[in-house]
Image (cartoon, grey):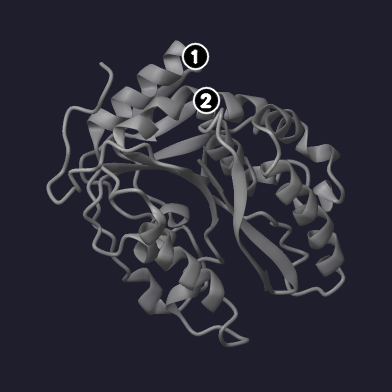
């Protein structure tokens, strides 16, 4: 099989164009759908996420979303036709637990992705009962609010091996030619002790500068650097040991564009830290 079996209604007739890949920040819990202190802290990020669909060559036939909030011993994919939502955040206003994102799953895409991973020697499985976590549905509520584009969610591998996640991205790259939009959803800075602490501003700046230079480098240089990201300036202050799950979706997004150049497409200062997003073509 070289393409997906089905194309949902409403897809542009140009949907055979190759999709880019993205690494996006998904914010803090349901931050875009509630009052925040200070007000407007997430406005720029919200505007960026809302605008992504307008930058694509066509409407995606489907989305493969890699969330920081799902880890498994091997790569796993949501395999159900109608996944539920997992409200995997705590302590937020009651109305944020009433959010809805009824996007369909696409078992055919999950099967195709598993086949590609297997061909690359990467073990995986489909989970027909797994729902969509907030690392997926919160940003997609902004990016594709009509919830008409089918979505399959991919887990991280719990060993958090950057080379394995780069390899997973490379394996999944052919999906882009089937008009599948691959999104890595995480945060370029994710040290919970650092948010809101002005001492972490320069720390996040140093790592972010390295991240921009790395993602915009030649693909082979980019991959070599990302495989050893922990050597970057202030890397472990931005992503503490065994807590780098919010950076690993970047590896999948970058790996899925093995010959494409990357570029920073968003940056903002939020809660005293610099947060960025990247696109790979």
- Screen quadrant of the N terminus: top left
Which residue is farthest left? 9
Label 2 neighbour load within 10 Å: few <14, some 14-19, many 20+: many
Alpha-carbon span between mark 2 and mark 1: 9 Å
Q: Quadrant of residue 124?
A: top left
Residue 128, given in percent of the width and then of the height, sits at 28, 34
Q: Residues within 10 Å of mark 1 (few under 14, many from 20)?
A: some
Q: Secondary structure at mark 1?
A: loop
Camera-side residue of 244 and 92 = 244
Residue 110 in percent (x, y) is at 32, 30
Residue 9 versus residue 75: which sits nearer the camera? Answer: 9
Question: For this view, does 144 lie left or right of residue 244?
Answer: left
Residue 193 is marked as none
Using the image, determine if residue 200 lies above or below residue 228: below
Give me the residue at 55% from left, 83% from top.
36
Give the SS element for disc 2.
Answer: helix
Residue 104 at what x, y percent from top left? 22, 47
Q: Image height check: is 67 above or below 1?
A: below
- Name the residue: 85% across, 60% down: 203
Can you see residue 87? no
Find disc 2 in the rendering and name its residue: 170
From the viewer's perspective, tell me whether residue 34 is left or right of residue 11.
Answer: right
Q: Which of the two discs, 2 and 1, sits closer to the camera? A: 2
Residue marked by disc 1: 120
Q: Residue at x 55, y 74 (%)?
A: 44
Q: Are marks 2 and 1 in contact (CB under 8 Å)?
A: yes
**Sequence-first disc among 2 and 1:** 1
């Amino acid at each position: 099989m070289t393409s997906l079996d089905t194309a949902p209604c409403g897809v542009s007739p140009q949907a055979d164009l190759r999709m880019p890949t993205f690494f996006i920040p998904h914010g803090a819990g349901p931050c875009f759908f509630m009052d925040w202190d200070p007000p407007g802290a997430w406005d720029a990020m919200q505007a960026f996420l809302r605008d992504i669909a307008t930058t694509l060559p066509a409407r995606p036939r489907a989305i493969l979303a890699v969330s920081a909030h799902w880890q498994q011993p091997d790569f796993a994919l949501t395999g159900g036709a109608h996944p539920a939502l997992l409200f995997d955040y705590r302590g937020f206003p009651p109305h944020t637990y009433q959010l809805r994102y009824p996007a369909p799953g696409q078992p055919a895409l999950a099967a195709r992705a598993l086949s590609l991973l297997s061909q690359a020697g990467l073990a995986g499985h489909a989970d027909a009962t797994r729902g969509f976590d907030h690392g997926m549905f919160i940003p997609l509520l902004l990016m594709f609010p009509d919830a008409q584009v089918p979505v399959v969610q991919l887990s991280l591998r719990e060993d958090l091996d950057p080379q394995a996640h780069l390899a997973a991205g490379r394996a999944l790259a052919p999906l882009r030619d089937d008009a599948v939009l691959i999104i890595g959803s995480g945060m370029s800075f994710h040290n919970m002790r650092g948010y809101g602490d002005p001492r972490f501003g320069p720390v996040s700046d140093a790592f972010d500068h390295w991240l921009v230079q790395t993602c915009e480098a030649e693909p082979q240089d980019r991959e070599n650097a990302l495989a050893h990201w922990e050597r970057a300036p202030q890397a472990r202050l931005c992503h503490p040991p065994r807590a780098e799950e919010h950076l690993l979706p970047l590896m999948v997004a970058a790996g899925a564009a093995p010959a494409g150049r990357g570029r920073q497409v968003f940056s903002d200062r939020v809660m005293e830290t610099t947060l960025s997003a990247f696109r790979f073509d």
